[in-house]
Image (cartoon, grey):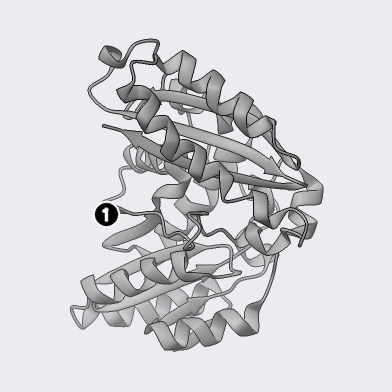
């Protein structure tokens, strides 16, 4: 695996690979890699001739400065994991390399898919995500890019960005990878304390229980309220939102017949750590 720090070198190396007829898969990350990330890398290695992984903690997608400061960084461990997973190129640029002074940045319009859930709670977050991912797509020019379904709304945003920019590539969404307890793997899990960690798996446990509540005849709104109240009853847990939405438009529903497919998305603080997860309602 070759580690690259500059855009110029990355473009040169990948141009050579393209001239040789190689297909390219991209896995954008912010580092602090776990098995969820590695599942994306392994799939990229399987589907494409060349796997490129980026590690860049993108300041433009953090609406909370403290969250940016405390975001876990472990570059040496990440490099070892990527080498073992079969990654070919690791792109680890500086902020100055990515965001050149005086450059005019793209502006995106996401409409209603950005006006709910994460878009409400984290103003500017999706604009920052779309900006860095669009830059990576321009540099790498991948045939496919891989994202985890834990960030369900983010995938919808990226698909919209791809349409707006007319990028020619496949967006591949991969299933959530979980601990044996059910807790969705996240780099932020590292920040859970000995006191708060036992409560984190309760988030997904409650989502699983809500499937039975639907079978029992409860409406989306009743389930949203019940999930929120029962999680908030636990010490250390504080639900920021739980919304059951149309799986395509991401708009709230009031009846199960409002959409052909529905998904429940949650953001919940466990102590000081903000965790997100989701579950599909059959």
On the picture, is 65 further left or further right than 266? right
Considering the image in quadrants, where does the N terminus appear? bottom left
Residue farthest along the left direction in this orientation: 21
Query: Pointer 1: what residue?
Result: 169
**Which residue is located at x 70 percent, y 65 percent?**
72
On the picture, is 280 further left or further right than 241? left
Considering the image in quadrants, where does the C terminus appear? top left
Foreground residue, 78 or 162?
A: 78
Foreground residue, 128 or 106?
A: 128
**Which residue is located at x 60 percent, y 65 percent?**
56
From the viewer's perspective, is residue 267 above or below residue 183? Answer: above
Q: Position of residue 8 (x, y in %)?
A: 50, 75
Q: Where is residue 250 in the image (x, y as percent from the top left)?
A: 40, 26
**Which residue is located at x 39 percent, y 14 percent?**
219
From the viewer's perspective, is residue 1 above or below residue 54? Answer: below
**Which residue is located at x 61 percent, y 69 percent?**
32
Foreground residue, 183 or 87?
A: 183
Q: What element carries label 1?
A: loop
Q: Is residue 263 visible?
A: no
């Amino acid at each position: 695996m070759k580690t690259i720090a500059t855009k110029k070198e990355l473009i040169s190396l990948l141009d050579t690979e393209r001239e040789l007829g190689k297909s390219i898969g991209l896995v954008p990350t912010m580092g602090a890699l776990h098995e969820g990330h590695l599942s994306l890398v392994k799939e990229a290695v399987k589907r494409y001739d060349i796997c490129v992984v980026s590690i860049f903690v993108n300041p433009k997608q953090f609406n909370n400065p403290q969250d940016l400061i405390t975001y876990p960084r472990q570059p040496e461990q990440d490099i070892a994991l990527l080498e073992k997973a079969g990654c070919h190129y690791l792109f680890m640029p500086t902020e100055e390399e990515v965001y050149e002074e005086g450059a005019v940045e793209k502006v995106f319009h996401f409409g209603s898919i950005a006006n709910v859930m994460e878009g409400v709670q984290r103003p500017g977050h999706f604009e920052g995500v779309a900006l860095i991912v669009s830059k990576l797509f321009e540099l790498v020019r991948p045939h496919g890019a891989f994202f985890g379904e834990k960030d369900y709304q983010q995938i919808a945003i990226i698909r919209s960005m791809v349409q707006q920019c007319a990028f020619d590539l496949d967006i591949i969404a991969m299933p959530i990878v979980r601990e044996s307890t059910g807790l969705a793997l996240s780099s932020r899990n590292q920040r859970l304390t000995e006191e708060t960690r036992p409560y984190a798996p309760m988030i997904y446990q409650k989502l699983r229980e809500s499937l039975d509540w639907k079978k029992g005849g409860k409406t989306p709104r009743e389930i949203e309220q019940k999930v929120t109240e029962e999680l908030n009853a636990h010490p250390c847990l504080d639900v920021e939102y739980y919304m059951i939405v149309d799986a395509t438009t991401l708009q709230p529903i009031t009846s199960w017949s409002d959409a052909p497919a529905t998904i429940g998305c949650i953001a919940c603080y466990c102590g000081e750590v903000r965790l997100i997860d989701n579950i599909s309602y059959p």
